[in-house]
Structures are given as C-alpha cells and as structure tokens.
Amino acid sequence: MGMDERKRRILAAVVSLYADAGEPVGSNLLCNYLDMAVSSATLRNEMAALTKLGLLEQPHTSAGRVPSMEGYRYYIENLLEPETGLTAAEKDRIDRAFEGFDYEPERLAKATAKEISAMTGYTAIATTPKSDDVKVAYFNVIQTGRSNAAVLSVSSVGGVATRVAATERPLTGDDIASITSYLNRTLCFVSKDDINPLTETLLKEGLGAQQALWPILAAALRLLKGAGRGKVFIAGQEKMLNWPELEPSLKSCLKLLGNTEELQRLISPTTSRTAVLLGDELEEGKLPGAAIATKRYLAGGGRTGTIALLGPSRMPYFKVLPQLEYFAAKLGTAMTGIEG
C-alpha cells in the first residue's frame, strides 16, 4: 500500500485541520475541506489506509483521526509547502520591532525571543552567536564592596560578560588598578585553548606579592573560557500552559529549558535548513506531544546563532516556519549590519 496523491492530500488536510482545532478530524469535516469529488465513505477508507500505514491515529473508536508522529514527520519532509512569504502586516510588525531593538548582541537576542514568542504564541529560544575564535578584547575591574569586585569583559565581537569575585582581605584602589592592568596585559586576545593548568599556575605566580587578588584573576579566566560560547535567552515559558498536549511533558520541557547547555546543543542545527524536532523522536529526554522548530542564523565571521520555538507537535508549520525564517534573517542582519 503506497502513498498516492489522494492519500498525500488527505494527510496534509488532516494535519492542517488538527492544527487549527486540536480535535480529531472526521470524514464529513474532511469532505467539506477538500475540493475532491469523493464521498465521505471513500475518505473513511483512505483514512483507514493511512492509519494502517502508521501516519494517522484514532484516539477513540468512533472518533476521527489525528496525525501520528510518523505522520507529522512524513508531512514535514514531503508535504510541507510554506506559504509564499509572510503577509505585509507580519513583515511590517517584525521590521518595526527590530527598529526599536538595542543592537548589543545579548539584548538583541533577548528582545528577539520575546517578540517571536508574542507573535506566535509559543515558547521562544534565541542564542547569541558562538565561535571558537572569539577572544576577550578588554577587561575592567570595579570594586563593589570592601572585599568584592566585579570583573567585566568585552569580547572581540562586542559581547559583554561579568563575574563577581570575593577576596580574603579588603581591597584598595591600588589593588583594583594593579589587577586591571595585569588582566589586560596577560589575557586580552588570548585563545581559550591556550589556558590550561600550567598557564593558570604561571599567571597566578605572576601576581607576585598580590596573591590575595587570585580570586579576581580566576574570575577573569572563567570569563575568557566562556567567551564565544553563546548565551541562551528564553521567552514565553508560560505559554506552554496554553497547550493541553504539552501537559504530559511539561515537567520535562521545563527541565530542558533550565539546562541551557543541553538546550543549546539540542536546538543547534547542523545545516542552514530549518529543522523540526518532534518530542517523541528525541533519543534522550522524550517530550511527548511537543515539537521544536529551529533555525540557524549567520552573524558574520563564521559565527552562528540559533532561534527556536517550542510548542505542541500540531503547530501549523506552514505558518510558523516562514515566521521563524524571517526572524532569523532579521536577527542575522542586526548582528552583522549586513543585509542578507
């Protein structure tokens, strides 16, 4: 039993109707939706055939059909035809939003996640660009308490990060000036791959009589090792409560969102193609009823970031994916200042 054109059209229609209403699709509804000269009885037979193929499921004996995970995967890989671009109103809303964004990378990623979550109604994730070649261009140390200091780093691509360090003795103005100078002499434009236990020991010995400042140096080293790793920003976590399908995996979804390292690994596409991860297909930590649509954006200099949406597996991909792709294009442009 193969997939002829009629079966393909019926599967696509069931996916679309189920995305709209969240209710099993019956033959009468399907007959009204499709422009096909076939009877309801014929449609029931075709839906039964699609069920035998594993592409549809029947939740209850007398109910209509819903797409299975295999059905969604077949639809995404073979039948999905995104709308011809976004509407003028959608593009205008996104363009105007980006005009008002702060173009500092972290603020830009955070604002983008918030805007696409508001527009789509799903939980959104956006990462800042990551690259192994990013280095720290400048350090500054600011005393924040009697024995506390904030270490600030500015990366070679404009990213800003801070860490707080506490020393065993009170700090003086000379201490702050001395350690700031030492950090900028020894750690600026140094590759994180060059930092190892031996170099850390040598750097600590370089403090000489100011060994008490080691916690500040250690904080700077952590900032250097984290440069270029990319940060993760999440918006609209509460929107998961709007989708009953996510209830079985809600706890697992929240756990995933709290593990930013694993989240970043999961949503980072290996190609420039927009990808859809179905929760039941994940090798580890399955998320029943959930799906993650993810798109990579280019940020110049070989750096890439990711923007993704977490929602129910029945999300209308033909609408969502073009929105995700447009946001990714705008985000890449904003990060580089280069159109396209």
Image (tube, rainbow, N blue to C red):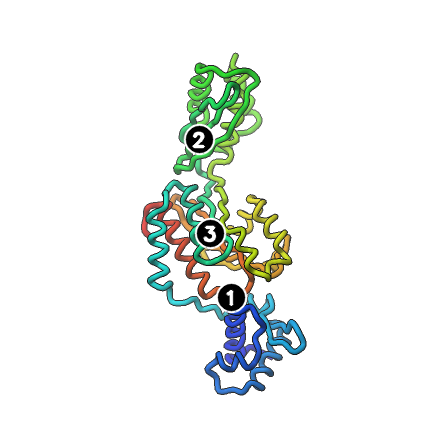
Q: Which residue: 48% across, 84% down?
A: 36
User: What distance separates the C-alpha of mark 1 from that of mark 3?
Assistant: 19 Å
21 to the left or right of 152: right
Residue 60 place in picture, x, y as percent: 66, 74
Residue 100 place in picture, x, y as percent: 34, 47
State the mark number for residue 153. Answer: 2
Q: Which residue is mark 3?
A: 307
- Where disc 2 sits, the SS reads strand
- Where disc 1 sits, the SS reads helix
- Where disc 3 sits, the SS reads strand
- Asked whether disc 2 touches disc 1, contact meaning CB atoms under 8 Å apart, the reply is no
Q: Which residue: 49% across, 53% down?
A: 308
Q: Earlier in the sequence, mark 2 or mark 1?
A: 1
251 to the left or right of 29: right
Amino acid at dot 1: Ile
Q: Earlier in the sequence, mark 2 or mark 3?
A: 2
Q: Is residue 244 visible?
A: yes
